[in-house]
Image (cartoon, rainbow, N blue to C red):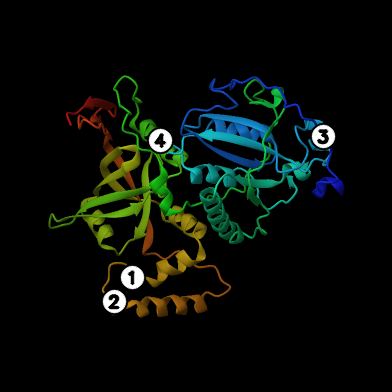
Amino acid sequence: MIRKLQLVTGDQALAGRPQAMPVTNRHHVNGNPLSPPFPDGMALAMFGLGCFWGAEKKFWEFPKVYSTSVGYSGGFTPNPTYREVCTGMTGHNEVVRIVYPPDRVSYAGLLRLFWESHDPTQGMRQGNDVGTQYRSGIYVYDETQKAIAEQTQQQYQQALSRQGYSSITTEIAEASEFYYAEDYHQQYLAPNPTGFGGGGGTGFALALPQRESQMLIKNETATLEEQTAERNPLDQFGQWFDEMLGAGFAEPHAMNLATVGRTGEVTSRMVLLKSFDEAGFVFFTNYNSSKAQDLHATRAAALCFWWDRLYRQVRISGRVEKIPAADSAEYFRSRPRGSQLGTLASQQSQVIEDYSVLEKAYQDLQQRYQGQEIPCPEHWGGYRIIPSQYEFWQGRPNRLHDRLRYSLTAAEEWKLERLSP
């Protein structure tokens, strides 16, 4: 057990062999090659996050990834076998290598999947899998990848520390030689779907750095056809939203909320979508804010999601209702403590003398609730927009954009129509 928890040195490692492991050069899932040469413009990423069977499946399911393969890296022994790696005498980690188009897939998006798919605080193990080959690792191919890896590690450490987790033990190192694992390990869970898929993550999400939005998909060749669109607009929205999440966009849930006041004045602002399902689209705000006063007056609103690098937007309109106070309180308790204090400190949309007013209110509340649970204020909570109409817009370079509108009929059925751009 001691050897399995300690990395060997180069002079202690097994000798290995010069012959590379023979593998079938065809991905069992998507048919693309496992080994070079890859198409021009492809980039590589490599991660270790426990058993590589389950790790590879997560990444071959990532939208737009070209190919994946599993192998051994980070150690000393050339072309090791699986049994040799399991002795702990090679220094290698079980890794998955990802081939992806960087103009369509964000490296930060891959990192988010990496962080959220395992527990990076466990050292030389993942769950019941114990040994140096199960350590958490990010193996970078250039300085840009290294910088993004270090930044996301810092962000995720902050998220985990707030929940009582210990320090992240993930190693971030320059990518060394990748040695293919035996052929039967490649895409193992495709022919063996009930096989062991490894442990789970911590359950906590990673918020991506804003600058990553500049590295993502420009989707000008996509189309939106009536024949392939989902019959239920919520399913179509969920499909597009999942593509946004998979691509690693910063703030994919940001949406423009438009309201109308008692006098007919229209105003709009950006808010964050917190959840959506058959019941509607939920966001939270101060009930004394100007937007809340508009919603109280008209009970109607419109949303617009603008996903520029996917060349898409979604417009939604419908009636509005408050969500139950108990649901608002439950969500409030899940927010970071600083956000809870900020909610109490700010009298949203009210004129204040200067920023020091907010700072003093915040500090006073910190002292007042030191060591105590912060209650959800009565003036804060959620609204649900219940759609009666959706419009999905897919841009085209020739400006003849695709526009599909779903309208709810008196029979509570969705009517799908194409609109001229």
Q: Amino acid type of disc 2?
A: Ile
Q: Disc 1 vs disc 2: which is toward the camera?
A: 2
The answer to whether 215 appears left or right of 350 in the picture is: right
Which of the two labelled residues, at mark 4 and mark 2, occupies the earlier sequence position?
4
Which of the two labelled residues, at mark 4 and mark 1, occupies the earlier sequence position?
4
* Quarter-of-image position of residue 92: top right
Question: In percent of the image, x 52 and y 74: which residue is there?
Answer: 369
* Quarter-of-image position of residue 234: top left
The residue that label 3 is drawn on is 84
Q: Determine contact: label 3, label 4, CB under 8 Å.
A: no
Q: Disc 2 vs disc 3: which is toward the camera?
A: 3
Q: Determine contact: label 1, label 2, CB under 8 Å.
A: yes
The residue that label 2 is drawn on is 352
Can you say whether 8 is above or below 43 in the image? below
The residue that label 1 is drawn on is 347
Q: Determine crowd level at label 4: few under 14, some 14-19, many 20+ residues with C-alpha closer than 10 A.
A: few
Q: Position of residue 118 (x, y in %)?
A: 64, 44
Question: In percent of the image, x 34 and y 34: which residue is there?
Answer: 219
Can the viewer see residue 128 in this picture?
no
Which of the two labelled residues, at mark 2 and mark 3, occupies the earlier sequence position?
3
Which of the two labelled residues, at mark 3 and mark 4, occupies the earlier sequence position?
3
Q: Which secondary structure, mark 2?
A: loop
Q: Which secondary structure, mark 1?
A: loop
The residues bearing labels 3 and 1 have C-alpha atoms spaced at a distance of 63 Å
Question: On the rendered image, what quadrant is the C terminus found in?
Answer: top left
The residue that label 4 is drawn on is 238
The residues bearing labels 2 and 3 have C-alpha atoms spaced at a distance of 68 Å
Q: Position of residue 125 (x, y in %)?
A: 74, 46
Q: Determine crowd level at label 1: few under 14, some 14-19, many 20+ residues with C-alpha closer than 10 A.
A: some
The residues bearing labels 1 and 2 have C-alpha atoms spaced at a distance of 9 Å
Q: Determine crowd level at label 2: few under 14, some 14-19, many 20+ residues with C-alpha closer than 10 A.
A: few
